[in-house]
């Protein structure tokens, strides 16, 4: 078997590697600070070797950007594309974690903190539980395959020789970042509403029976009802996660089409 290695192919390969590196630096799980940088670079190199023979590129158009300054800018563009795809998926996990933090605040677990092994920062109990469950669903429904499929498709929607990205891309990313709050409310709506009604009922009871030690009653009551609601709405939450991650491929393609103009 003979390999026809040319300078143009080497330039193209490093552009593919740059786009994959941006994805590995921002995609959930691999973007964790606990994952060594060597693992991320090795994964980028591995997937680059697999994807490189599958893409079509215009050597004549690419040869116009072989000047080192233009080539460096092109590498920066490829990294931005990879980072954008990873952060779009990360927004989903952030929304789910935010829902858990809101629930913990209402239950009285706002001060109970654990260390998140991915970000290595303190997070609430329900937030960490929701994040771990979301990762399991993400991997269980093969959403990571959809992410890799979208990455391969990105080379058709945003060719390597395109010199710039459409400005609408950054507007779309900001819009998706704003959807974090919508995702958190949808994910925790049943529990949030019930705990809000419990809080209102406790306030009414405090006005009716002022002699009652409302603090000693409200804290275990909110924790008990909160845990009960978490167990009751678990089927809804799992269905929500499956639908959320199931639509990620279409969302990624939509963003890629915008970026490619």
Image (spheres, rainbow, N blue to C red):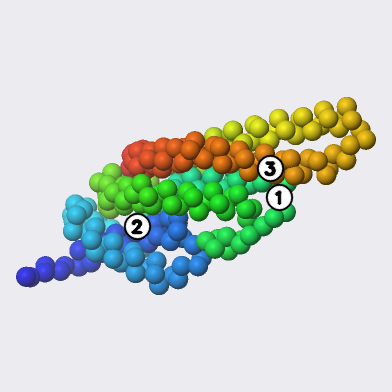
The answer to whether residue 144 is seen in the rendering is: yes
Q: Residue at x 62, y 53 (%)?
A: 125
Residue 50 in the figure: left or right of residue 257: left
When the figure is inspected, residue 152 is found, relative to residue 190, above or below; the finding is below
**Location of residue 15 by image quarter:** bottom left
Residue 1 in the figure: left or right of residue 261: left
Labels 3, 2: front one = 3
Callout 2: SS: helix
Labels 1, 3: front one = 3
Residue 240: give its label. Answer: none
Where in the figure is residue 14, as x and y percent of width and height?
29, 64
The answer to whether residue 94 is seen in the rendering is: no
Q: Residue at x 64, y 53 (%)?
A: 124
Mark 1 crowd level (few <14, some 14–19, many ≥20, 10 Å Cα): some
**Location of residue 19 by image quarter:** bottom left
Considering every residue shown, the one lying at the far left of the view is: 1
Callout 3: SS: helix
Q: Which of 243 and 54 lies nearest the eye of the viewer?
A: 243
Q: Earlier in the sequence, mark 2 or mark 1?
A: 2
Considering every residue shown, the one lying at the far right of the view is: 211
Residue 19: give its label. Answer: 2
- Report how far apart the C-alphas of labels 2 and 1 lie in the structure: 39 Å
Residue 110: give its label. Answer: 1
Q: Residue at x 45, y 71 (%)?
A: 36
Callout 1: SS: loop
Residue 164 in the figure: left or right of residue 187: left
Where in the figure is residue 27, as x and y percent of width and height?
43, 55
- Report how far apart the C-alphas of labels 1 and 3 lie in the structure: 15 Å
């Amino acid at each position: 078997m003979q390999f026809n290695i040319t300078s143009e192919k080497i330039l193209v390969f490093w552009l593919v590697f740059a786009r994959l590196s941006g994805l590995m630096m921002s995609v959930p799980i691999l973007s964790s600070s606990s994952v060594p940088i060597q693992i991320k670079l090795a994964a980028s190199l591995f997937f680059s070797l697999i994807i490189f023979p599958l893409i079509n590129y215009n050597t004549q158009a690419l040869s116009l950007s072989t000047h080192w300054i233009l080539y460096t800018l092109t590498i920066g563009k490829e990294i931005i594309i990879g980072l954008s795809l990873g952060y779009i998926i990360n927004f989903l996990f952030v929304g789910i974690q935010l829902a858990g933090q809101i629930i913990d605040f209402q239950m009285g677990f706002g001060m109970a903190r654990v260390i998140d092994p991915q970000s290595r920062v303190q997070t609430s109990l329900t937030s960490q539980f929701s994040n771990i469950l979301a990762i399991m669903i993400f991997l269980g429904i093969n959403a990571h395959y959809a992410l890799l499929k979208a990455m391969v498709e990105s080379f058709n929607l945003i060719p390597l020789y395109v010199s710039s990205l459409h400005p609408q891309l950054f507007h779309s990313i900001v819009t998706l970042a704003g959807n974090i709050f919508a995702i958190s409310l949808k994910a925790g709506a049943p529990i949030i509403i019930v705990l809000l009604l419990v809080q209102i009922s406790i306030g009414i009871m405090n006005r009716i029976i002022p002699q009652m030690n409302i603090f000693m009653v409200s804290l275990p009551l909110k924790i008990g009802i909160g845990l009960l609601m978490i167990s009751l709405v678990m089927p809804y939450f799992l269905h929500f996660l499956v639908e959320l991650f199931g639509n990620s491929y279409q969302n990624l393609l939509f963003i890629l089409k915008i970026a490619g103009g």
